[in-house]
Amino acid sequence: MSVWYDVSGLYDWKGNFTGIQRVVYNLGEKLAEDNSDAHFFVFRSGSFQEVDFADIQKKVNVPAGPQQTSPVARKSTRTILQHYGMVAAKEVAVNSRYEKALRGLYGNARSTYKRARRRKMASATTSLFHSDDVVVVVDGNWQFRDFAAAIIHARAEAGFRFVHFVHDLVAIKNPAFASPNANKIIGSYFEEIFPHTDGLVAVSEATKKDIEWFAQERKIKFPSVSVVPLGSDINLGTKSVAKRPQINLPDEFILAVSTIEVRKNYQLLYYAYKQAKRRGVMLPHLVIVGRKGWMAEETYTLLTKDPEAQESITLTGGIPDQELEWLYDNCLFAVVPAFCEGWGLTIAESLQHGKCCVSSDTSSMPEAGGDLVSYVSPYDSNGMVEAIRDLCNIAERKKLEARIKAEYKPVTWQDTYKVFVDILASDL
C-alpha cells in the first residue's frame, strides 16, 4: 500500500507555521521518515504532481514578510470582474421584468462552466494514484479551485481509498468569524467532497459533532469519523535549544499564541486590560505571538495604537519555534480568549510545558484542557480579569502547576502519528 500525502497548501508556504500548517508538516515529516512507500503531491494547474518532502524541510522557518498570509490560488482581474459582473446582474434583476431572462442566462452560463470543468478534470493527470493506494488530505483545499472535482475524478478512475482531515467548521457555523463568503466556499467544498471519502478524521470530539451536524443539515452522505489527538511538543525544524526573542520583555509576562483574527477574540484581552486599568488592578504584561490575519484591522489598531495597551501588551508577529519554546518556558501562564477552536493547540502546548492556562469555555477548548485549565466566557472581560488575577497568586499557581505535572499526559506528534497510521491501515 502506497500512501499519497497532500502538501498543496504547505509547499509554497513562507515563514513560520500556524496551527494547520504545523499539523500537516509534523505528520508529513514522520510519514517521510517512517514509510519508504510514502509519496507527496501538490495540486497545480488542474493536475496532481509528485514533490519531494525534503524540499519543504529546507524551507522550514524561512522568515516571512510583515504582511505574509496563506498562499492562495490567485484569480485574474478578468475572472474577478466576470464574477462580480454576474453578482451585479443577479442583484439588478431581482423584481424586474428582466429577472427571468437574466436568471436563465446565468443558469446556462453555470451549466456550460460545469461541463467544461468536468472535461478539464477528465484530462487531469491522475496516473499518480492506483487502486491499492491511500490518498490523504490534511489541509483544507477549498483554497485551490477545482481540487475537489479533480480528486473525485481521480478516485473514480483509480479506485484508491481517500481520507480527509477536518480541523473545524467555524466558518460554516458562524460566518461572522471568517472572511466574506468563506462559509459558502468551505461549505460547498465539504458538501462536494464528503460523500466521496472513505474516512474523515476530526481533530477533536467537538469537531466530530460539527461534522455530523453539517452532514445532517445538508442531507449528504458521510463516512465514519475518527478522532486524532494532536501533538503538543514543539519540535519543528532545527533541534537547537530554546532561544530568547530579540524583543524587550519584562521579567514577568503572560502569553497568548495565535494568528490575530476576529475568531481569536483578542478584543477580550484588550477590554480586560482596559477594565483592569479602570479598576486599579495590575495585570502582568501580555505577549501576543501571531501574525496579522484576516478581519483583524480594528483589533490590531486597538492593540497597537492605544497608549495604555502599548504599555501592557507586546505583539511579536510570527517567530521561530526556538523562540516560542523560550516564551512558553518563561511565561507565568497562557491565555486563550478565542470564541471557538477546532482543537486548542495553545492550551495543549502550555500544559505540555507545565504551565497554567486561562481559556474560553466553548467548543473544543474544555476538551483540550480538562479540569487543569481555568475557564471564562469569551464575552466576559471582567471574568477574564479575575481569572488572570487568580493565577497571579503564586501559591495558587504553584499548586495548579503541581497538578499539571502530576496529572497531565502530553500527546506527542509521535503519538498523533501512531493513531494516524492505524486509521490508514484500518478498514475505515
Image: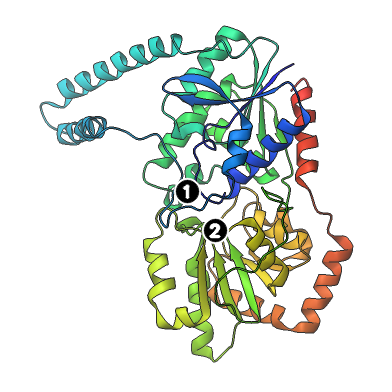
* Dots 1, 2 in contact, CB < 8 A: yes
Residue 313 image label: none
User: Residue drawn at (50%, 28%), measured in percent from left and top?
Assistant: 191
Say if 424 sits above or below 404 in the image. Answer: above
Query: Circle 2 sits on which residue?
Result: 339
- Residue type of the residue flagged with mark 1: Asn
Query: In this orientation, which residue lies closer to the viewer: 217 or 168?
Result: 168
Q: How far apart are marks 1 and 2 (CA)?
A: 10 Å
Query: In this orientation, which residue lies closer to the viewer: 75 or 153?
Result: 75
Secondary element under disc 1, as helix, strand or loop, is loop
Residue 274, percent from left and from top: 48, 81
Residue 164, percent from left and from top: 62, 29
Residue 306, percent from left and from top: 40, 78
Tell me how many marks there are: 2
Say if 261 sits above or below 119 in the image. Answer: below
Residue 94, percent from left and from top: 18, 33
Mark sitting earlier along the chain (1/2): 1
Residue 174 image label: 1
Query: In this orientation, which residue lies closer to the viewer: 319 or 283?
Result: 319
Query: In this orientation, which residue lies closer to the viewer: 293 or 48?
Result: 48
Q: Which image quadrant is residue 300 in? A: bottom left
Q: Is residue 144 left or right of residue 419?
A: left
User: Residue drawn at (52%, 31%), measured in percent from left and top?
Assistant: 8
Quarter placement of the C terminus: top right
Please identify the residue farthest to the bottom as the structure is shown.
280
User: Residue drawn at (74%, 25%), measured in percent from left and top?
Assistant: 424
- Residue type of the residue flagged with mark 2: Phe
